[in-house]
Image: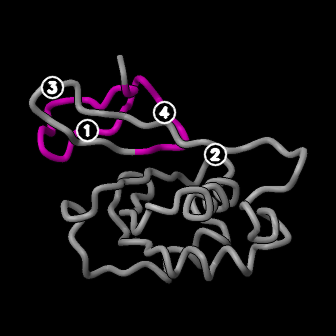
Amino acid sequence: MSEMMDEMVNRLEPDRPANEVPNLFHLNRVDEPDKQVRELVGQFFLDDGLDRVCVVVEGEVRGTLTRRTALDMGKSYSGRIGGGEHAMLSGTGKGYFLRLECPRDDCEETVRVTVFDENDPPRCRRHPEEAMVPAGT
C-alpha cells in the first residue's frame, strides 16, 4: 500500500458492519493509490450529505471512514487536494467516482468506485450472484 492509504486504513472505524453503511468505496493498491485516497477524502468536501463510507481495499472490507476523519485528513493534504476550500485547485482536473448499482429492479444497492473492470466487477452485497453495473444502464 501507499503511505497515504496506510494512514487512511489505520484511521478507519472497524466496528461498523459494511451492510449498515450506504456508500461503499472500492480502492486498490495498483492504480495510483494516493490519488484514490485524495479523491475519496475530497468527496467529503464536495458532498455535504456524505456522512460515512465503507472502504473496501482489494476486495476486503477494511472499515468505515467518517466525515470527521476524512475532513481531518483533508486538512493534512491541503497542499495536495486544494487547501480545503473546495477540495480542488483551480485549473486541475477533478477525480470522480463511478456509481454502480445492482441490476435487479427490486434492489437499491449502490457502490462508488474509482476504477471499474467490467471483467471483474464488484458484486452486490444483497445479491452476491449479481455483478454491479454502471448506474442508469
Can you tell which mark lies on residue 133? Answer: none
What is the C-alpha distance between the residues marked 4 and 1? 12 Å
Query: Residue 126, position in %: x, y?
Result: 12, 44
**Mark positioned earlier in the residue sequence (1 or 3):** 3
Query: 10 Å neighbourhood of mark 2: few (<14), some, or many (≥20)?
Result: few
Question: Eyeballing the image, is 95 above or below 17?
Answer: above
**Label 1: which secondary element:** loop
Q: Residue at x 43, y 75 (%)?
A: 66
Q: Real-space Cα distance between discs 3 and 4?
A: 19 Å
Q: Is residue 30 left or right of residue 94?
A: left
User: Horizontal and vertical percent for residue 49?
Assistant: 44, 61
Identify the residue at image location x=85%, y=56%. 89
Q: Tell me if mark 1 has few (under 14), some (14-19) or many (20+) residues whose alpha carbon lies within 10 angstroms of its own.
A: some
Circle 3 Cα neighbour tier, 10 Å, few/some/many (<14 / 14–19 / ≥20): few
C-alpha distance separating marks 4 and 2: 11 Å
Q: Name the outermost residue toward the front.
A: 48
Mark 1 vs mark 3, foreground winner is 3
Task: Give how far across and how far down residue 131 sits, in percent.
Answer: 26, 29
Of the pair 80 and 9, the residue shown nearer to us: 80
Number of residues whose C-alpha sits closer than 10 Å to that of mark 4, classed few (under 14), some (14–19) or many (20 or more): some
The quadrant where residue 84 appears: bottom right
- Give left or right: position of 97 versus 94: left
**Nearer mark to the viewer, of 4 and 2:** 4
Q: Which residue is mark 4?
A: 116
**Cβ atoms under marks 1 and 3 closer than 8 Å:** no
Residue assigned mark 3:
104
**Residue 77 picture location, percent across and down:** 75, 73
Which is closer to the viewer, label 3 or label 2? 3
Tell me which label, 3 or 4, sits earlier in the chain: 3
Q: Which residues are magenta?
A: 112-135
Callout 3: helix, strand or loop? loop
